[in-house]
């Protein structure tokens, strides 16, 4: 069993997302209109990890990882056949967050990758696709110190039909300034990284080292949960020796970002929702604290809940999460649950409007 495609899964959403114009070489993505629904498995119109999120797509299919060796197909059936540039075949590889490709006589890296195409076959549908590398940029800055930059890739896809138009792999870009205060260098670019693997059905982290993940690598579009884990140094490829993170911490961050309150893989959030977080290690999101305490988080979901990030907003999901599980309040007349007295890893706050007192 392979993990299903991972974006930033949400439940109900009613929104019109205005998208910027793409470069002329790539078809402009249509403005998305997502109707409200409760996540209900394969027939749900929303991805398991988010409505309206910037997840990678090939054709109509969302995915999040590929095996660079070409040996294994992912959960959606996509398998890497190779990489072509100017008629020459190369073997692609991702090390940390760097893509390279080798032939017997040459190595492609950095700007040398521009114009190359990953050959993809869907072993289920027998369709053939190409993912073209349109740009390689060394400008995206980490959101956690050290604030150095790393390589990102603007990607487009086509089928093998001669008249196929190129379309963006990351087709629903977010605002350049993220709601938690971080900045995206280019909202059309993706981060490629190895070392971590994810199960999108359960919203869990299933691998945390290169040894465990092997030749699998992630494609994390700007704004989705995997990009935020990477930018906040909660992945093997982005952690530092001075501040490493373990599986429980990374999974707690995954649960927090997707608002998997019940810890069952059901997410209750909307991309772009303002949120502030602080960790027991002393890290915090860039934007300032918000007035309403939301929740405490572990790798199993929320420990307790006060004011949910979408409470009394247009996308309020209180009826859904109240039906899914019962959570105790963090703040009561007799005391307050905290990071220190619960052993939780993360605490979140939001500007959401508190519910009226009954």
Image (cartoon, grey):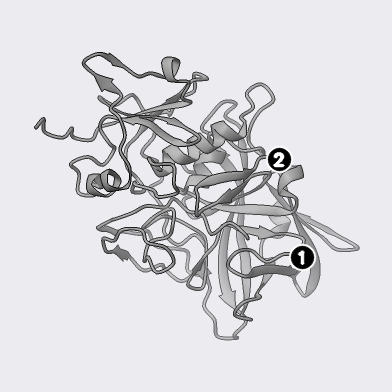
Circle 1 — which element? loop
Q: Which residue position holds label 2?
A: 209
Give the camera-side residue of 67 and 119. 67
In this orientation, does residue 341 appear?
A: yes
Asked whether, in this view, residue 90 is left or right of residue 171, the answer is: right
Closer to the N terminus: mark 1 or mark 2? 1
Vertically, is 291 above or below 8? above
The image quadrant that residue 248 belongs to is top right
Residue 1, percent from left and from top: 63, 60
Q: Residue furthest left?
A: 358
Asked whether, in this view, residue 157 is left or right of residue 323, the answer is: right
Vertically, is 87 above or below 334? below
The image quadrant that residue 88 belongs to is bottom right
Circle 2 — which element? loop
Task: Identify the mark at residue 71; answer none if there is no mark.
Answer: 1
Asked whether, in this view, residue 317 is left or right of residue 204, the answer is: left
Q: Residue furthest right?
A: 104
Check if mark 1's residue and mark 2's residue have beta carbons within 8 Å: no
- Residue at figure coordinates x 80%, y 65% from the top left: 90
- Residue at figure coordinates x 42%, y 60% from the top left: 47
């Amino acid at each position: 069993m392979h993990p299903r495609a991972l974006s930033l899964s949400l439940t109900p959403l009613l929104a019109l997302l205005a998208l910027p114009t793409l470069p002329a070489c790539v078809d402009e993505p249509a403005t998305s209109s997502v109707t409200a629904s409760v996540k209900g498995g394969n027939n749900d119109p929303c991805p398991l990890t988010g409505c309206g999120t910037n997840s990678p797509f090939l054709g109509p299919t969302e995915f999040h990882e590929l095996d660079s060796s070409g040996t294994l197909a992912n959960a959606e059936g996509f398998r890497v056949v190779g990489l072509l540039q100017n008629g020459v075949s190369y073997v692609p590889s991702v090390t940390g967050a760097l893509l390279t490709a080798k032939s017997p006589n040459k190595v492609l890296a950095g700007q040398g990758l521009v114009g190359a195409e990953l050959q993809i076959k869907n072993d289920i549908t027998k369709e053939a696709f190409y993912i073209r590398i349109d740009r390689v940029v060394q400008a995206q800055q980490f959101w956690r110190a050290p604030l150095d930059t790393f390589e990102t890739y603007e990607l487009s896809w086509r089928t093998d039909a001669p008249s196929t138009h190129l379309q963006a792999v990351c087709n629903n870009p977010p605002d350049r300034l993220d709601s938690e205060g971080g900045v995206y260098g280019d909202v059309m670019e993706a981060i490629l990284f190895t070392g971590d693997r994810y199960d999108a059905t359960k919203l869990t982290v299933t691998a945390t080292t290169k040894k465990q993940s092997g030749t699998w690598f992630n494609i994390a579009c700007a704004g989705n949960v995997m990009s935020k884990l990477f930018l906040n140094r909660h992945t093997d490829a982005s952690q530092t020796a001075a501040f490493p993170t373990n599986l429980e911490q990374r999974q707690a961050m995954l649960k927090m970002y997707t608002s998997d309150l019940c810890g069952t893989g059901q997410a209750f959030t909307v991309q772009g929702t303002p949120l502030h977080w602080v960790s027991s290690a002393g890290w915090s999101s860039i934007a300032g604290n918000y007035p309403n305490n939301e929740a405490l988080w572990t790798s199993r979901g929320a420990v307790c809940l006060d004011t949910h990030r979408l409470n009394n907003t247009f996308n309020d999901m209180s009826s859904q999460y109240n039906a899914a599980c019962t959570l105790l309040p963090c703040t009561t007349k007799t005391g307050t649950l905290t990071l220190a007295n619960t052993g939780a890893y993360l605490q979140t706050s939001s500007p959401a409007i508190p519910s009226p007192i009954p």
